[in-house]
Image (tube, rainbow, N blue to C red):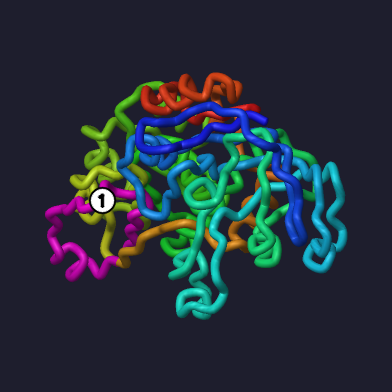
């Protein structure tokens, strides 16, 4: 089979390798699609190296169909059969560390990740190891989705984890900094939670147009403070979600929130980066500040259910696709921010 292998930063090769078979407790998926995100490109450039194995097959936003089931899998998935569509929860947690025991498996001290240490979805067939199967990291769908839709279960699950922390109440004003794929997903989730208005900042006019089509208010960053003040009678936003890893936005988010508001730093920032912030904004406004990283298995289940319900506008998110044979063009499209999100179809 063909697979994209990341040997080292900037050394991504399309190779032929043996197709995996399902050993005891394992499942093999025929990959239907894998969407790329900014983290995939950071792995490619070497900007992110933690937990990444040399020679790994990248890709963690996977849609596939079951093509082989190993002996013993039935004790975990009694109804699983060949042909079922499925995705994975990429965080394979240990189940016994302090974080796992306190319902923080997404922050597991011993976690391994698909697309980082475990081979991911940029290959024709993906082996789900026995440990992941036993932990319940395989998620069959209850109805067939388009592959590009099912791929979004991973980023949506992460957004749901963030949403649980910053919360959106009916009638809230939500501000989202950034209209990339993640910002557009947070926009849709906020509206589903009953937000009265969702203001999304982005410099690109095309992205702002997408925001408007999805029911949000697209604003240029230069106009954002005035727009938020005008739309909230000078109070500020109930919720501010930072979806761009730009350090200067850290303090901007605090300024945009009204007293008692919630601020979530969802984006990953460059390793070692620091930001100058005014702590009195948190102190005197009594802001609740949270982060967001990865997702629990139950978040993936919720994401799949949302996609099955049809409430997520998938076509506004996944706008371009490439065959696996053109993997380098796909990565270049991510770098050049072509469209919104790129899918790779084996």
Nearer-the-camera pick, 291 or 332:
332
**Quarter-of-image position of residue 46:** top left
Task: Judge by depth and name the residue closer to the eye, 328 or 259.
Answer: 328
Front residue (pair 254, 234):
254
Pointer 1 local density, CA inside 10 Å: few below 14, some 14–19, many at least 20: few
Is 81 included in the stretch rendered in magenta? no
User: Can you give x and y, in whole percent of width and height, for residue 297 in the image?
Assistant: 61, 62
The answer to whether residue 121 is left or right of residue 141 is: left
Quarter of the C terminus within the rendering: top right
Q: Is residue 236 visible?
A: yes
Q: Position of residue 313 (x, y in %)?
A: 60, 35
- Quadrant where the N terminus sits is top right
Position of residue 275 in the picture relative to residue 55 (left or right): left
Task: Tell me where the magenta segment starts and ends, as one range.
Answer: 260-287
Name the residue: 18% across, 70% down. 283
Left/right placement of residue 306 relative to residue 282 reads right
Q: Residue at 56% of width from left, 61% of height from top? A: 92
Residue 331's spot in the image, x, y percent?
Answer: 44, 27
On the image, the x and y values in percent for residue 155 come to: 52, 46
Question: Please, is residue 299 above or below residue 126 in the view?
Answer: below
Helix, strand or loop at mark 1: loop
**Residue drawn 73% across the image and 38% down it:** 30
Question: Residue at the spot x=50%, y=50% of the render?
Answer: 190
Please tell me whether residue 65 is drawn above or below residue 11 in the rendered image: below
Q: Is residue 309 visible?
A: no
From the image, tell me which residue sits under label 1.
Answer: 271
Q: Is residue 301 left or right of residue 59?
A: right
Question: Residue 279 lies in magenta, yes or no?
Answer: yes
How many numbered circles are shown? 1
Among the 4 quarters of the image, the one containing residue 183: top left
Residue 60: quadrant of the picture: top right
């Amino acid at each position: 089979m063909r697979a994209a292998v990341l040997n080292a930063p900037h050394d991504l090769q399309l190779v032929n390798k043996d197709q995996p078979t399902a050993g005891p407790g394992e499942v093999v998926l025929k990959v239907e699609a894998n969407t790329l995100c900014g983290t995939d490109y950071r792995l490619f450039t070497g900007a992110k190296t933690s937990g990444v194995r040399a020679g790994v097959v990248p890709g963690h936003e996977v849609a596939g169909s079951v093509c082989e089931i190993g002996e013993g899998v039935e004790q975990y998935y009694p109804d699983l059969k060949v042909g079922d569509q499925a995705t994975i929860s990429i965080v394979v947690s240990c189940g016994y560390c302090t974080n796992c025991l306190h319902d923080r498996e997404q922050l597991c001290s011993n976690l391994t990740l698909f697309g980082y240490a475990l081979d991911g979805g940029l290959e024709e067939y993906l082996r789900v190891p026995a440990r992941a199967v036993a932990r319940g990291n395989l998620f069959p769908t209850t109805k067939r989705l388009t592959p590009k839709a099912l791929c979004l279960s991973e980023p949506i699950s992460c957004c749901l984890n963030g949403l649980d922390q910053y919360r959106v109440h009916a009638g809230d004003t939500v501000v989202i900094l950034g209209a990339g794929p993640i910002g557009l997903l947070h926009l849709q989730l906020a509206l589903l939670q009953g937000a009265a208005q969702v203001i999304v900042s982005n410099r690109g006019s095309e992205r702002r147009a997408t925001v408007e089509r999805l029911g949000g208010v697209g604003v240029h960053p230069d106009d954002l403070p005035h727009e938020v003040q005008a739309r909230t009678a000078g109070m500020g936003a109930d919720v501010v979600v930072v979806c761009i890893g730009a350090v200067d936005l850290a303090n901007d988010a605090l300024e945009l929130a009204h007293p008692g508001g919630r601020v979530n730093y969802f984006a990953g920032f460059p390793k070692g980066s620091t930001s100058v912030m005014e702590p009195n904004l948190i102190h005197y406004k009594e802001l609740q500040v949270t982060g967001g990283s990865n997702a629990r298995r139950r978040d993936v289940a919720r994401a799949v259910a949302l996609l099955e319900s049809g409430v997520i506008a998938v076509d506004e998110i996944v706008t371009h696709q490439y065959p696996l044979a053109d993997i380098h063009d796909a990565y270049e499209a991510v770098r050049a921010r072509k469209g919104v999100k790129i899918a790779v179809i084996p």
